[in-house]
């Protein structure tokens, strides 16, 4: 099957690499986002999918306008049977009709739940014990088309967006293989989504990372994990913006040998026995790894060596 692959981030690059090795697939071209400035030096940097494509000497298209006749003509020239889309963009109607079998998309949720740009982050932030990967036929609406294959993925207590995406690769590849073989063999399941059960997963905003210590400790812990690596869970301490990179939850009344932790007001800090406790609206949050803006993440004991004042520490509003 002749395939044009469409994707951008590292997560998508794993699927491209798999298709390059799959005996059923002939990847004839790759479509990805334009190169973007990255890092402190704002150096123009190619997306991971482009890097992977060039390593295999594949043609790469980086259109600015998916609705342009030029892009449609370029795609038609490849004579693809199928477009495989992983973390790329919504395809316009004229593009969906170019390939023989249309387009399938790999999405990081159990659709119809969490339609949108940030399904993995939203599932973690909501404290779900599991999510999944869905392969479905693309239509003109966001994450709306009929389902071909799904696999569940457990969300562990310390999973971040980065670690959960890693866990999704293997079940996602298995679902993609299943879906493509269905198309090749003419046995598509095409399970229409229950649109009444749909929920959204909108793109993250920078300000969502601001920590509200009036929330319960478990909710804060979930949000910090969900927003790792971006935008991060952050607040201000001693006048500096700091990111809480790794945390855990200590329930009220079960703070072990750390006397006084259960009585902390929201945002108040207790650093004792090399443990960093913060009061919340319900329960105690233990910070395990912290990062001052412009610095590298570090264990809390290392961070606290640079803090002169140890008593009456309180996180400030951002």
Image (spheres, grey):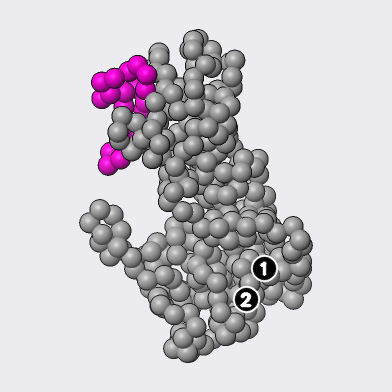
Q: Residue furthest left?
A: 41
- On screen, 79 above or below 173? below
Return the residue at label 1.
144
Compared across the picture, whether 95 is left or right of 136 comes to left
The answer to whether residue 223 is visible is yes
Label 2 packing within 10 angstroms: few (<14), some (14-19), many (20+): few
User: Mark 2 and mark 1: span between their CA atoms?
Assistant: 8 Å
Q: Position of residue 101 (x, y in %)?
A: 65, 79
Circles 2 and 1: CB distance less than 8 Å? yes
**Helix, strand or loop under label 1:** loop
| Residue drawn where x is 37% and y is 22% of the image | 313
- On screen, 129 above or below 263? below
Q: Position of residue 106 (x, y in %)?
A: 59, 63
User: Which image quarter is the N terminus in?
Assistant: bottom right
Q: Is residue 89 magenta?
A: no
Q: Position of residue 59 (x, y in %)?
A: 40, 77
- On screen, 264 above or below 8? above
**Helix, strand or loop under label 2:** loop
Q: Nearer the viewer, residue 60 or 43?
A: 43
| Residue drawn where x is 39% and y is 68% of the image | 50
| Residue drawn where x is 54% and y is 49% of the image | 121
Magenta-colored span: 290-313
Label 1 packing within 10 angstroms: few (<14), some (14-19), many (20+): some
Residue 222 image label: none
* Residue 303: quadrant of the picture: top left
* Residue 116: quadrant of the picture: bottom right
User: Which image quarter is the C terminus in?
Assistant: top left
Residue 140 image label: 2
């Amino acid at each position: 099957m002749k395939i044009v692959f469409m994707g951008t981030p590292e997560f998508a690059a794993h699927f491209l690499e798999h298709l390059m090795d799959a005996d059923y697939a002939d990847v004839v071209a790759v479509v990805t986002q334009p190169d973007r400035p990255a890092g402190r030096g704002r150096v123009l940097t190619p997306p991971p999918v482009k890097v992977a494509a060039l390593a295999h000497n594949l043609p790469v298209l980086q259109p600015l306008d998916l609705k342009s006749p030029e892009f449609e003509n370029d795609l038609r020239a490849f004579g693809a049977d199928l477009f495989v889309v992983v973390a790329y963009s919504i395809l316009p109607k004229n593009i969906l009709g170019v390939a023989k079998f249309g387009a399938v998309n790999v999405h990081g949720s159990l659709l119809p739940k969490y339609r949108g740009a940030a399904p993995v982050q939203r599932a973690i932030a909501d404290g779900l014990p599991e999510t999944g990967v869905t392969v479905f036929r693309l239509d003109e609406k966001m994450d709306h088309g009929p389902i071909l294959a799904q696999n569940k993925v457990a969300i562990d207590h310390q999973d971040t967006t980065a670690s959960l995406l890693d866990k999704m690769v293997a079940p996602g590849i298995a679902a993609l293989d299943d879906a493509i073989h269905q198309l090749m063999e003419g046995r598509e399941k095409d399970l229409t989504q229950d649109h009444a059960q749909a929920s959204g997963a909108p793109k993250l905003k920078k300000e969502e990372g601001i920590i509200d210590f009036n929330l319960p400790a478990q909710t804060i812990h979930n949000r910090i994990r969900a927003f790792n690596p971006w935008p991060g869970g952050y607040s201000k301490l001693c006048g500096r913006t700091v990111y809480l990179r790794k945390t855990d939850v200590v329930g009220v009344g079960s703070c072990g040998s750390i006397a006084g932790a259960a009585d902390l007001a929201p945002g108040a800090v207790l650093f004792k026995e090399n443990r960093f406790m913060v009061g919340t609206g319900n329960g105690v949050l233990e910070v395990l790894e912290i990062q001052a803006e412009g610095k590298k993440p570090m264990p809390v004991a290392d961070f606290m060596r640079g803090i002169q004042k140890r008593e009456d520490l309180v996180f400030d509003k951002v």
